[in-house]
Amino acid sequence: MGNFFHRIYILDISTILITIPILLLVWSVIGAAFCKYIRIIGAVLAVIAVGAILYVTVLTRSESGAGADFIPFSSFERAKIQPEFYRSMLMNVFLFVPLGLSLPFIFGGSTRKRILLTILAGLLLPITVEAIQYFAHLGMAETDDAICNTVGTAIGSSAYLLTLLWRKIFFIKKDLT
């Protein structure tokens, strides 16, 4: 399993940047085409996403000393010196996109409520992960990680909006034929 995540991590940054919109588009079409089953499909994806997040951020880490960086956006300063930090930030975004893809389909209520709850979950989970990393001495707890994770969740949740658009288009076409 670790080899799978390592292969994703070493992908070109351009590949990741292309993959994110493709995921959004594909997931939104799946959401529109399988609207009867999307809550179940979303729940399965959410469980897989949370499992992958915990695997990568907590379960496979060994005790290495605790540290913390609570200064927002300090990773950008470090990235100017060490460009690898850009990859790290992008991967922190990418890791949470599947969570953002799945949660709006699970939550009930208005579109606004679904998106807000998804983003809130995308904030609370990384804060919890960072706290576990810090207190269990599993690495650096960084505000930037939580920010990037939340951004990834928000980006993923935009697929829900696309799904609503596709549903309107599909239903309009059905009415016209």
Image (tube, helix red, strand yellow):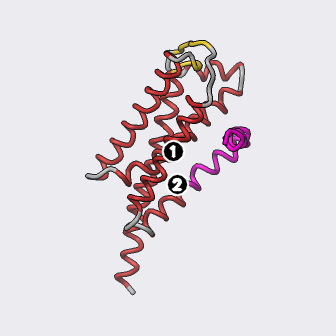
Q: Can you tell which quarter of the image residue 11 is in?
A: top right
Q: Specify start and end residues of the magenta stretch as a single range.
A: 1-23
Q: Position of residue 95 (x, y in %)?
A: 56, 40
Q: Which mark is residue 116?
A: none
Q: Nearer the viewer, residue 106 or 79?
A: 106
Q: Amino acid at mark 2?
A: Leu
The residue identified by callout 2 is 24
Q: In what quadrant of the picture does the C terminus appear?
A: bottom left
Tell me which residue sits at (46%, 35%) in the image. 150
Residue 81 to residue 121: above or below: above
Q: Amino acid at mark 1?
A: Ala
Dominant secondary structure of the residues highlighted in magenta in the image: helix
Residue 40 to residue 154: above or below: below
Magenta span includes 39: no
Q: In what quadrant of the picture does the N terminus appear?
A: top right
Residue 87 to residue 45: above or below: above
Label 2 to label 1, Cα distance in Å?
A: 15 Å
Whether the residues at callouts 2 and 1 have beta carbons within 8 Å, the answer is: no
Q: Position of residue 99 (x, y in %)?
A: 47, 45
Q: Nearer the viewer, residue 69 or 81?
A: 69
Helix, strand or loop under label 2? helix
Tell me which residue sits at (52%, 25%) in the image. 144
Q: Residues within 10 Å of mark 1 (few under 14, many from 20)?
A: many
Helix, strand or loop under label 1? helix
Of the numbered discs 2 and 1, the one sitting upstream in the chain is 2
Tell me which residue sits at (40%, 48%) in the image. 103
Q: Position of residue 10 (x, y in %)?
A: 73, 39
Residue 77 to residue 19: above or below: above
Tell me which residue sits at (56%, 16%) in the image. 137
Q: Position of residue 171 (x, y in %)?
A: 37, 75
The residue identified by callout 1 is 49
